Amino acid sequence: MLIVKKFGGTSVANKERIFNVANRCIEEYKKGNDVVVVLSAMGKYTDELITMAKDINEKPPKREMDMLFTIGEQMSVALMAMAMNKLGVPAVSLNAFQVAMHTTSAYGNARLKRIDTERIRRELESKKIVIVTGFQGINKFDDYTTLGRGGSDTTAVALAAALHADACEIYTDVDGVYTADPRKVPTARKLKEITYDEMLDLATLGAGVLHNRSVEMAKKYGVPLVVRSSLNNEEGTVVKEDVQVERMLISGVAVDKDADRIAVIGLKDEPGIAFKVFDTLAKKNINVDVILQSIGRDGTKDISFTVNDNDLDDAVAALEANKARLTFQKIEANKEVAKLSIVGAGMMSNPGVAAKMFETLYNENVNINMISTSEIRVTVLINEKDAERAMNAVHEAFGLSD
Ligand code: ADP
Ligand code: ASP
Ligand code: MG
């Protein structure tokens, strides 16, 4: 069997944890399996690199940020290979260049396009454990890129797909995927199984336990994922196409505090305006999420939408630069908002789920700014200060609590 194992930052945060991971991988290797290990930077090292960079230049060039980021993962893989060597097992560390992990050119937010597997195969054939840097790639300019925060999960899934691995295991600092972030909702329960679609929505809407692109890729290539703890032997959560267990109405609740709201006020109420606003943002590669357009009055209308915190300044600048063409009077930006979402395939066949969520928020005296829904999700925009209280109340109302 070929097994891809990915370990996040907390799982390799210090010497003891590095040896813990080395031992777990060696155990697998000694069963006669081929083992490919994907690692993140140690502990909060990526955050520390950002602090260092911003101390030098508050708006560092994205290319140079990626150049800097790559050292975090490179440090982990080299130290892990040394640990395995110390334990008497042959291992080799490889970075994105050595493997050849080709990505799009967008620094800081690149997408994996193609992975050469030849070098990894060769190392596996010579009976080594292969340890690969997560999060990083290379682009057509032969520069380093990164896949976005949390991107090591995606590296692992992409490698599992490219190598046709038999299993892809994501080891982290919680026992699996829970009905809500167990650090914010103490009564959250671990899920035995969850579908790709539900997990994708949860990951996209703030459940940071998996990088959303890793779930997208796992679904696309049919890679079954297991999320489990690196610190114990609990079973974890299986993420797959369809689940066997009886489906609950709601599988999980997520909060995204990185959402900001932009209101474009006083736009001319005429055809093509929404296109021009969102085209301006798309050209800058800015993702827009929940959108609300007000009913026009006196020949004008307002359009509000959410963007990620990282994109707020660029979005406002792009709109302001086109003020005359876009015909708006002013822009209001609000950072103090959060998205609260409930996700569950069970809501497809059950009307009244949204109403129940709104009722719960009403009882908690939480005001709703914007609403967006899909077949398996309801998202509301609320004030950030209410986020945790609202999350716990909704979790309880849908019977998810322990
Ligand atoms: P790693 O460094 O291993 O990649 P992350 O910090 O990226 O770890 O992801 C694990 C964290 O995700 C957990 O510590 C937990 O606080 C958070 N989390 C958010 N939502 C959920 C959820 N629904 N289930 C489990 N963990 C969650
Ligand atoms: N080290 C990177 C980060 O902190 C990638 C990862 O951990 O997945 O975002
Ligand atoms: Mg992570």
Image (cartoon, rainbow, N blue to C red):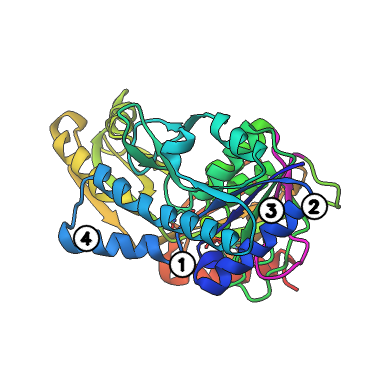
Q: Residue furthest bottom?
A: 186
The residues tagged by marks 1 and 4 sit, at their Cα atoms, a distance apart of 19 Å
User: Residue tagged by mark 4?
Assistant: 54
Between 6 and 207, the one lying in front of the other is 6
The label shown at residue 353 is: 3
Q: Residues within 10 Å of mark 4 (few under 14, many from 20)?
A: few
Count of numbered tags? 4
What is the quadrant of the C terminus in the image? bottom right
Residue 67: x, y in percent?
30, 46
In the rendered image, is residue 178 in sight?
A: no
The residues tagged by marks 2 and 4 sit, at their Cα atoms, a distance apart of 46 Å
Q: Are marks 4 and 3 in contact (CB under 8 Å)?
A: no
Cβ of mark 4 under 8 Å from ligand 2: the answer is: no
Residue 127: x, y in percent?
67, 43
Q: Residues within 10 Å of mark 3 (few under 14, many from 20)?
A: many
| Magenta span | 222-241
In the rendered image, is residue 323 in sight?
A: yes
Q: Is residue 59 part of the magenta span, yes or no?
A: no
- Which mark's residue is nearer the viewer, 1 or 2? 2
Q: Is residue 323 left or right of residue 112?
A: left
User: Residue tagged by mark 1?
Assistant: 43
